[in-house]
Structures are given as structure tokens and as C-alpha cells.
Image (cartoon, rainbow, N blue to C red):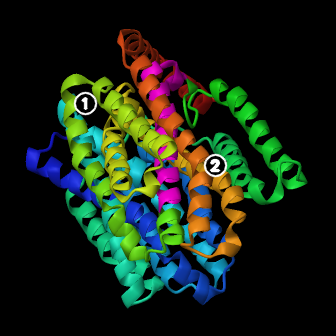
Amino acid sequence: MPELSHRRRMLVLAICCMSLLIVSLDNTVLNVALPSMQRELHASVSGLQWTIDAYTLVLASLLMLAGSTADRVGRRRVFTTGLVVFTLGSVLCSVAPNLEMLVVFRMVQAVGGSMLNPVAMSIITNTFTDPRERARAIGVWGGVVGLSMAAGPLIGGLLVDSVGWRSIFWINLPIGLAALWLTWKFVPESRAAKARRPDPVGQLLVIGVLAGVTSTIIEVPSLGWTSPLILALIALAVGCLLALLRYEPRRPEPLIDLRFFRSAPFSGATVIAVCAFAALGGFLFVNTLYLQEARDLSALHAGLYLLPMAAMTGICAPLSGRVVGSRGPRPSLIVAGIGMTASGLLFAVFDAEAHTALLFTGYVVFGFGFGWVNAPITNTAVSGMPRSQAGVAAAVASTSRQIGSTLGVAVLGAVLAGGVAASSGSGRASASYVHAFTDAARPAWWVLTACGFAVLVLGILTSGTWARGSAQRAAARLEQDQPLVAAARGSSRAA
């Protein structure tokens, strides 16, 4: 790809951030609209869960396929296809006649969404070749997450109250069309130097693993661990994982090269992404439920309560990108781990929910900590890998985030369910209900604290001299094996 001017690179970054904005907004806005959707579509709670979880499952399953396909056939081509599919899916969601069709159209959205974020990150990686400039660009990218967190509940609350829940999908149409036009006009095409072959078997095995794990998490609270369906889903996930570990190393061009994980920073970034986004998903889920059910706030007011957390995330993410660019990922990961751990302790030990001032302090501290974590995750995942596989590396990081969010909501939701159910007859916002909610949430806050502490420990362990050496050795090995891959490809064609 030709070297672009600074102004053109900034424009490419802005276009890529637009795709992140619509995907992130879609999740935060949807949560606000769930009660209205439930009333109009006569949906059960589990039905509403599937409007979110169907999207999550498809998105997580296809992220790595989208990344590798973009490296092979062209990043701009896949990115524009994703914009078209996501925008079309949004329009279909807005006219869904019933819950079942809404779930199907959410899956269409997810197919398009899987082509956006990892591919956009690959475009950024190949546009910003200077490590320091790239880290700063990734910091801006992370700041968009904070913007969506802040704007989503507010925009959703205003739209739902004034126009109706269907309007939350309309906001994707102008942004999607604008991003599509700008991409065709200003984003140059790029692809890997040597096209990688499709890996349909590996893709099916990845889908099997993620579908088994995600479905188990969703269904086990209601069905129990001894249910035949749960046992079958566990067997599916374990079987596909074992087959994936056996099959992928034997391919010259796998869907995901397991040798990536010989790099301690890459492996650390993957696990940190799971822990950090599990904390975020659980934090938002528990607090949104607490504010609306225990404090009896409207969706819009609940969004306003969470605004300090989102604002801190938006402020700190670009700062983290600058620090990563100048001093590496370790300082940002340490600050992130300390902030998220401290926030969890405020709720677990000091009952921050019971005191408004302490509640807002917990929100600010969590937003501060989480704001520092995104840039080092993404930068570490893609910077140590060959640029020819940047799309796959970015997709692994995105998949880890998605899995983390799913785990956070599922695990913390299951922890809450038992304690809160006992007070269901007391009514929302009653003293007994608030007390029961606080007691039930305490174990959930300890889980969140453990996630923050894991970010801190892994950040220290996987960012030192030994870890950097393992990354260099892994990258050198991958570059060395490129000629062997080409030779194997040529032999196969000759045969």
C-alpha cells in the first residue's frame, strides 16, 4: 500500500472509527430499548436475551474468518461488504414483525459486524506503519468505545421515549452510508503480500467451539449442568477444541496460526482482553440492573448515572495510546489493572451501591482503569506479528473481547439471579429488594475484582524482557516459515 499523507491517514482513522461507533452503539442502545421491545413483541426474558446473544454468537464465530479473508481478498473490499450487510441488517431489524424475525435480523447484523472492527483495525495497522503513531491511532480507536458507552444510553433513552424502540436501528443508516461512501473514496485497498487459502474445516471447528461455549453459558442457569442439552453442548465445545488443536498445526495456512500463542505478549493480550471485557460486560449489566430495578430509575436516568464512567474511558483511552507509543504497554496495563481492581473492591468491601457519592466514585475509578486497557491489548496483539497477518491477529483480539463480554454478563448474571429471586415479591425499589440486591451482588463484585487483578498480574508478567524476547522469536519463526508455505502451495498446485 502506498505511503499516505498525515491528513489522509487521519481521515482513514476517522472512517474506521465510524464502523466501531455504529457497532458499539448498537449494543448499548439496544439494552435501553429492551423493556419497550418486550411489551410490543410480547417477548419473554429469555427471548430478549437471544436478541443480544444471537448477535454475540455469530459475531464471535466469524471474526477470525473475516480477518483472514480480508488479508486474502482485500481489506477495503471486505470492510465495505460489512458496512452494506450491517446497514441492511439494521433496516431489517427496524421492521421486524415479531421476536423470531428480530433475532434472525440481528444475526444478519452480526455477519456484517464481524467484517468491520477486526478489518478496520487491520487497515489502521497497515496505514500507520510507525509504531508510535500507530499506538496513538489505536488510542483514538479505543476512545470511540468510551464515546459509544456515553452516547448509547442517552441516545437510546431519547429515541425510545420519543419515537419508539424501532428508531434505535435507524441511526445506523446515515452513519453506515456515509462510512461506505468515504471508504470507497479515501481508503486504499490493501491485502497480504501472499494470499492465504481458505480453511473451511478450521472455521467450522471454531464455530463449534464458540457455539458450544456460548450456548452453554446462556442455557445452563435455567437447564442445569446435568441437562442432556448442556452435556451435548459441552461435548461439542470440547470435541471441536481438541480437533482444532490437532488439525490446525498440520495445515500450511491455518485459519489461525497457533504459533501466535508462543508469543507471551500476544497470549497475554488475549487473556487480558477476556478478563477486561468480562469485567466491563458484568459491570454494565449489574449496574444497569441495579439502577433500573433497585433504584427505580428510567433508562435515560440510568444512562446519565453511568456517564462519569464512560467519560473517563473516553478521556483515558487516547492517553493510553500515547503512553503505549512512547513507553510500551506495561504502564497502561498496570494502571488499568489497579483501577479496575480498586473499583471492584469499592463495591465488594465498602458497599458502594448504598452511598451515592461512593457509587459515583466507583464508576469513575472503573472508567479510569478500563480506559487504559484497550490500547495495549490491540497494540500488543498486532504489533508483534507479521503485517501480512495483521487481520487475523486483530480478529483474535476482537474475538477475545467478545468472549469476555459474554462471560461477564453470563457469570455475573447467574451469581445475581439466586439472591434477587428471593425478594421478587417485595417490589422494585423496596428496602428489602435493595438489600437483597446488594447482598446478591457482592460475590459478583469479587469476580470483577479478580478480573481486574488478573489484568494487573498478566500485564506485568507478559510485558517484560523475557516476554518481548518470546514475541521476537515467534515473529521470526513465522517470517521464516513463509517460504515453506509458498513452496507447499506451489507443490499442491502442481499436483
Q: Position of residue 490 (x, y in %)?
A: 54, 27
Q: Position of residue 332 (x, y in %)?
A: 30, 31
Is residue 280 a member of the stretch shown in magenta? yes
Dot 1 corresponds to which residue? 324
Q: Residue at x 18, y 35 (%)?
A: 133
Q: Toward the viewer: 460 or 462?
A: 460
Is residue 475 a member of the stretch shown in magenta? no
Magenta part of the protein: which range? 259-287
Q: Residue at x 31, y 39 (%)?
A: 372
Instruction: Using the image, determine if residue 247 lies above or below residue 353.
Output: above
Q: Toward the viewer: 434 or 188?
A: 434
Dot 2 corresponds to which residue? 411
In what element is the residue under mark 1?
Answer: helix
Q: Is residue 409 left or right of residue 215?
A: left
Q: Is residue 29 left or right of residue 251?
A: left
Q: Quadrant of the N terminus?
A: top left
The quadrant holding residue 159 is bottom left
Q: Residue at x 85, y 54 (%)?
A: 229
- Kind of residue at disc 1: Val
Q: Toward the viewer: 201 or 151?
A: 151
Principal secondary structure, stretch drawn in magenta: helix
Dot 2 alpha-carbon crowd within 10 angstroms: few under 14, some 14 to 19, many 20 or more: some
Mark 2 or 1, nearer chain start = 1
